[in-house]
């Protein structure tokens, strides 16, 4: 069934929905006929099952049949925080994290980042478009936001305000991701911090430890910086029963 | 520590190892000095910790200090079988499956495959190079083979000869991946079958069911064909204690 995101929509209680602009045109292009059903997602986790009443290029009118929680939304909101990698690895991290079930994605500069954009905020629009596309394609109930964190303190602060803040690190004394997750199946929020191409400096891991994050290992295989987030989110989804 | 694959190496019992050709040149280029240590992996799961005795562009002599099982190898050998996708999605599936811990990767043509190479065997050399690079980078103890299956029967046959054959499917009656895995933590081998861009035809899922595969769901989010394998392998690694 065709699925549309309408950010900020609040159809609750309304018998009919009016879609204008790009989505109306999209309904027209898809040749959806009156009487056919579509799903409108309010991007806040609710799906509105609707039946098309009429449509043209400018506007579509739909009858709201049912409002249900979007099944595509996991029970745990995972924030992915990544040291900015080079080039299209960013696009990749966004797309795969959204598919895997991430709630939002934050990029930041750490010591070993090679990419040093003069104005990262300029990139946010494009990055959020990638997230929206991935969210539509994978049937998410929200469009995970992609944001920029000014400094590492802000990153750690965001993480420690979740139920389970995790810092993925390749060396030294670490907890097994599995043992950390087994103990906390009840979490509602979590954060996963992963590094850029060169990984993190020891002091960055130390700061995370001091801040109270779990310094975690994801096994003996060394994951590329663009692979670590999707693996971590998948493990979290699996451990919290969101992969079935 | 620098790490080299030497396929077919059998250094066991030998006090010294001689490296020639590309790897000898590599040692030379890396400016590894006599007295420094390197790891030679025999691509069969063993690491040979060696100390460089002498080296030039053509040949390097090393003293074998210790032979240990490669920590990068998971306890379960997962065979990934994928309906051939288009373009660089193949490269992506190979690289990420190897990083995630797959034992070998098999591509095949299913009903909805868009890519229809006239001679897929021509591509195997390049595909296996991608696997070798990913294996080196991620610290694997083997180089997962990438092969081509002539027909779907061969694919199902390969899968059912593992301890846990899984068929990832997006609709209909399915088992939760988690419940299937929870019941089988002791497995030594497993197979994961995933589809091409358009997924599988119902009859392909039916055949898998009849053949005795577990028809599995990986949750409510729709994964791209190139994302499903890495998510499935990661879930398997997590469930079998190979992600810590």
Image: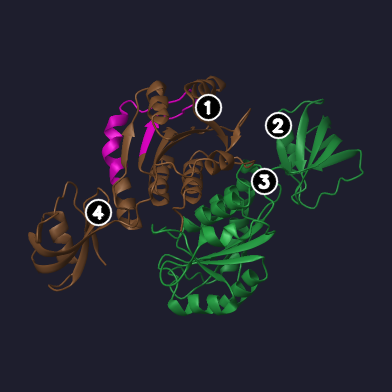
Chain colours: A green, B brown
**Secondary element at tag 1:** loop
Question: Which residue carries the number 3 mark?
Answer: A140
Reading the chain from its start, which is encountered first: label 2 or label 3?
2
How much space separates mark 2 and mark 4, taking CA atoms?
Answer: 51 Å
State the mark number for residue B46: 4
2 and 4 marks in contact (CB < 8 Å): no
Mark 2 or mark 1, whichever is nearer to me: 1
Q: Chain of mark 4?
A: B
**Secondary element at tag 3:** loop
Region in magenta:
B105-129
Report the label total.
Answer: 4
Q: Position of residue A137 (x, y in %)?
A: 62, 41
From the image, which quarter does the N terminus of chain A lie in? Answer: top right
Mark 4 or mark 3, whichever is nearer to me: 4
Q: Is residue B167 magenta?
A: no
Question: Which residue carries the number 1 mark?
Answer: B200
How much space separates mark 4 and mark 3, taking CA atoms?
Answer: 43 Å
């Amino acid at each position: 069934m065709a699925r549309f995101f309408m950010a900020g929509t609040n159809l609750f209680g309304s018998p009919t929905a009016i879609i204008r602009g790009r989505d109306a045109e999209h309904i027209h292009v898809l040749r959806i006929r009156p009487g056919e059903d579509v799903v409108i997602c309010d991007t806040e986790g609710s799906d509105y099952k609707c039946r098309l009443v009429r449509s043209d290029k400018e506007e579509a009118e739909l009858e709201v049949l049912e409002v249900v929680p979007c099944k595509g939304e996991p029970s745990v909101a995972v924030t992915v925080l990544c040291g900015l990698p080079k080039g299209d690895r960013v696009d990749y991290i966004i797309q795969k994290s959204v598919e895997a079930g991430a709630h939002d994605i934050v990029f930041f500069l750490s010591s070993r980042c090679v990419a040093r954009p003069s104005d990262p905020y300029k990139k946010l629009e494009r990055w959020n478009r990638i997230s929206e596309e991935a969210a539509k394609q994978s049937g998410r109930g929200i469009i995970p936001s992609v944001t920029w964190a000014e400094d590492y303190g802000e990153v750690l602060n965001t993480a420690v305000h979740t139920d389970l803040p995790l810092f993925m690190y390749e060396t030294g004394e670490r907890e097994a991701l599995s043992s950390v997750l087994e103990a906390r199946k009840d979490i509602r929020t979590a954060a996963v911090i992963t590094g850029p191409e060169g990984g993190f400096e020891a002091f960055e891991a130390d700061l995370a430890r001091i801040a109270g994050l779990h310094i975690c290992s994801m096994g003996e295989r060394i994951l590329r910086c663009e692979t670590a987030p999707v693996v971590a989110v998948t493990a979290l989804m699996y451990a919290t029963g969101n992969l079935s």
